[in-house]
Amino acid sequence: MRRRLELALLLGPALLLFVGFVLVPIIVAAYYSLYDWQGFGALTDFVGLGNYWDVLGGNVFQGAVGHNLVIVVLSLVVQLPVSVAIALLLNRKLRGRAALRLIVFAPYVLSEATTAVIWLLILQPGGFTDQALTFLGLHGVIHQWLADPQVVLFTLFAVITWKYLGFGIILLLAGLQGIPPELLEAAALDGASAGQAVRRVVLPLLGPTIRIWIFLSVIGSLQVFDIVWIMTLGGPANASTTMATYLIDHGFKRYEFGYGSAVAVVLFIICFAFALVYQRFALRRDTEGAMG
């Protein structure tokens, strides 16, 4: 009885917050998505699944899904190897290592709005980036970084990478701290080179941390909003529209709250499905002990 009372006292507030701020909004959004509602008056124009058919059949939303997937793939292909390499470097005994870690992590403490405004100014035509490339003799590389439909998504990915790379590196450094140095010493005594020790000892033991990084990176890439919205509003010509910016554009700018709610539900289902599959096939081995 005492144990149940303790569990109720400890879990009760968190459970109430979860129900009130997570489950109830999801249910309400799913309910609104069944109506053609502009945010004013009663819900009377029932359209059933019509909003969902319009969302899933729309070219702009399909493009937004593609943009999110591009960011997901680039995150895994570019950010992960770079993060692991820098984490391994910063885990070694270097002069000024603490300062280097601070420099790498500093962008992460900036808000998304601050980051977007800073890079919006840097990437302006004739701005710092263009002047730096001209100084280096790379004038031919200069583009309309945020106005060229062929370039804007990659420009935004570079800004997102600058913002979040430090978080991944700190996460991986924490994982590296948990690897017993005796294992690396034993590998060295057995004649393993530094590269072999990293490939056969460090990376396998760093696996749980890398899997957590992948999970956070994919979910973050699917929900990316702030930086894209402030820097491009999803433009030009929807070339940088993501699912989240598409949701806000229709839900709050165009007052299509029923349609926007359908987009929110679709985005939630995509993220939730990925989380379930990833938990089942990737994270399960790491959480079996904790869950048991």
Image (cartoon, rainbow, N blue to C red):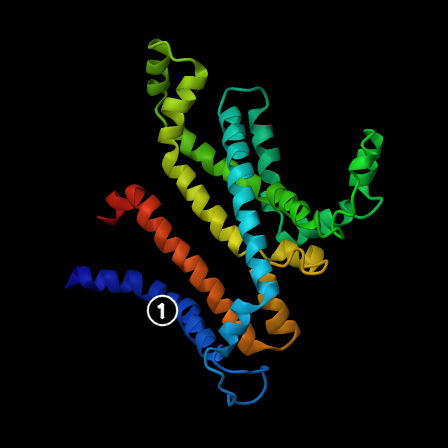
Q: In which quarter of the image is residue 102?
A: top right
Mark 1: few, some, or many residues within 10 Å (few <14, many ≥20)? few
Quadrant in the picture for residue 194 = top left
Q: Position of residue 19 (x, y in %)?
A: 37, 69
- Give the mark count: 1
Which residue in the structure is indicated by mark 1? 16
Drawn side of residue 84 relative to residue 64, left or right = left
Decide: is 65 above or below 189: below
**Whole-percent x and y of residue 237?**
71, 60
Quadrant position of the N terminus in the picture: bottom left
Q: Residue at x 46, y 48 (%)?
A: 216
Which residue is rendered at x = 34% and y = 65% of the image?
15
Residue 167 % position (x, y)? 53, 41
Residue 141 in percent (x, y) is at 78, 37
Quadrant hosting residue 211 = top left
**Which residue is nearer to you in this view: 20 or 157?**
157
In this rendering, is residue 214 above or below 149?
A: above
The residue lying toward the viewer, choosing from 185 and 145, is 145
Q: Does residue 169 appear in this view? A: yes
Q: Is mark 1 on a helix, strand or loop?
A: helix
Q: What residue type is labelled 1?
A: Leu
> In the picture provided, is 137 more to the left or to the right than 209?
right
